[in-house]
Structure formats: C-alpha cells, structure tokens
C-alpha cells in the first residue's frame, strides 16, 4: 500500500485536477486506487458533481451521492474561505485530532494506492492552532506539491518547499499545473524551478480540454506509486 498527500502552494492551483488525472491513470493501469479529500470549503450540494470531491468520485468511478461524499469528504463547508473561518460561519469546529485519525484510518484501509488531497495551500488554517502543514506532519506520508505557472510562482514554490523540507517531509515530486493567462511559458517556469529543487523531479502539465485526463505527466507520476 502506498499513500500520497497532494498539497499545493496556494488555493485554486490545480490539486484536484492533478489528483483526478493520477487516479484515472492508475485505474487505466489496473491499480486499486482510493482517494479522500477530508476537508472542502466553498461546497454547495446543488453543484456537488462539479465540486472537488465530486470530481474525485467521478475519477474513481463512483457516484456523486451524499453517502459517497460523506465517505471521502466528511468536513464540507459552504463558505469559500479557509476551513477555520468557513467552519465558524456555520457554528462548527474542525477537530484536528479527528481529522488525523480519519486520514490514518484511510491509509490503513487502502488496498493499494491512497491519495489524500489537502485543502488550499500548505499553511491554510484548519482551526485556531493547526494548519495543513500540521496535518501533513501528523500523517507523515510522501507529499506531492502542486504549484501554478503564474508570475510569482517560483518564489511561492521555493518558499513552500523550504518549509516542507524543514519539517522533514518526504517530497515525492513537484507538479506545475499551467495557470490560465500566465505571461511566462510553462517550460521556462519548469526549468527554473527544477534548477533550484534538485534532486526533486519537476513535472509540468499544460491546460487540458475538459474531461481529458491522459497526459505523459500522469504516467510518470503513477510510476512513483
């Protein structure tokens, strides 16, 4: 069994896009893959199929139902805010120890591959004292860092990587998900980041047509698992 935590340098970078593409590739290879996205904000039941957990369920070949959503994303909040603020809007609190236990149980129960998708960037608050980084440290599985190709991403990427390295997290790779409208060519961004992060592998994936999940990057990522 292999578990991988999919995190990012920020919000709306492409974690779900990358996770769904990797799930699809693993399934094409006949692998048994499971995925969870325990925490999601900005969730609306009316558009559940288009939500992050909805996209993951579709990639897994499972129906987007309330039961399935509860199984992979038990902490769903309506406000498109950091989880601590989104929970507060609803008079709720995200219990960190329960989140960690949920994640560990999913890791132990996986037959082959488990993907854990985080929420927002690595320093997004989950409650009054814990961030996504604390969550990654607690579950202690290899991480895949997803970043964008927008102007400024190099600094954000290297900053996130430095924080993760100082916490002794194992970094399986970096995926650059092409940002729409970026003035910098994707290949240039990938080349610059690669120079600074050796020996970590950097994978660049362009914008793909809706519904498309096949790309050589996903095959290379699947080889890590």
Image (tube, rainbow, N blue to C red):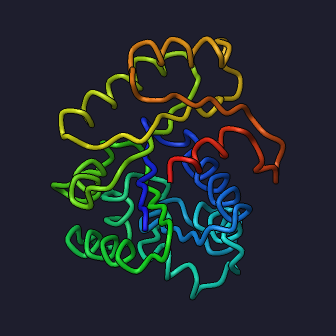
61 or 13, which is in the foreground? 61
Across and down, in percent, residue 12 comes to: 55, 42
Residue at left 41%, top 29%? 200
Relative to 40, say whether 74 is above or below. below
85 or 41, which is in the foreground? 41
Across and down, in percent, residue 150 comes to: 58, 22
Across and down, in percent, residue 197 comes to: 39, 21
Is 103 positioned to the left or the right of 219 in the image?
A: left
Residue at left 74%, top 62%? 28
In the rendered image, the residue lying farthest to the left is: 129
11 or 71, which is in the foreground? 71
**In the figure, residue 39 lies in which quadrant?**
bottom left
Residue at left 55%, top 13%? 191
Is 101 positioned to the left or the right of 12 in the image?
A: left
The N terminus: image quadrant: bottom left
Q: Count every numbered label the image shows and give the total.
A: 0
Across and down, in percent, residue 98 comes to: 25, 76
Is 45 positioned to the left or the right of 181 in the image?
A: left
Relative to 108, say whether 31 is above or below. above
Is 115 positioned to the left or the right of 31 in the image?
A: left
**In the figure, residue 43 lies in which quadrant?**
bottom right
Residue at left 75%, top 41%? 215
**In the figure, residue 161 lies in which quadrant?**
top left
């Amino acid at each position: 069994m292999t578990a991988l935590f999919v995190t990012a340098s920020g919000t709306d970078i492409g974690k779900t896009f990358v996770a769904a593409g990797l799930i699809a590739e693993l399934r094409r290879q006949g692998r048994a893959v499971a995925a969870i996205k325990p925490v999601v904000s900005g969730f609306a039941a009316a558009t559940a199929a288009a939500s992050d957990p909805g996209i993951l369920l579709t990639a897994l070949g499972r129906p987007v139902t309330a039961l399935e959503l509860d199984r992979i994303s038990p902490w769903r909040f309506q406000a498109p805010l950091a989880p601590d603020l989104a929970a507060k809007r609803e008079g709720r609190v995200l219990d960190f120890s329960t989140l960690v236990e949920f994640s560990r149980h999913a890791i132990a129960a996986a037959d082959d591959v488990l993907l854990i998708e985080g929420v927002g960037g690595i320093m997004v608050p989950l409650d009054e004292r814990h961030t996504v980084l604390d969550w990654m440290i607690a579950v202690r599985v290899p991480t895949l860092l997803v970043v964008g190709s927008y102007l400024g991403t190099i600094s954000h990427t290297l900053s996130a990587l430095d924080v993760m390295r100082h916490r002794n997290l194992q970094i399986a790779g970096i995926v650059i998900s092409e940002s729409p409208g970026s003035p910098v060519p994707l290949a240039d961004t990938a080349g610059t980041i690669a120079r600074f992060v050796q020996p970590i592998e950097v994978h660049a994936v362009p914008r793909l047509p809706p519904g498309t999940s096949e790309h050589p990057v996903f095959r290379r990522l699947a080889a890590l698992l």
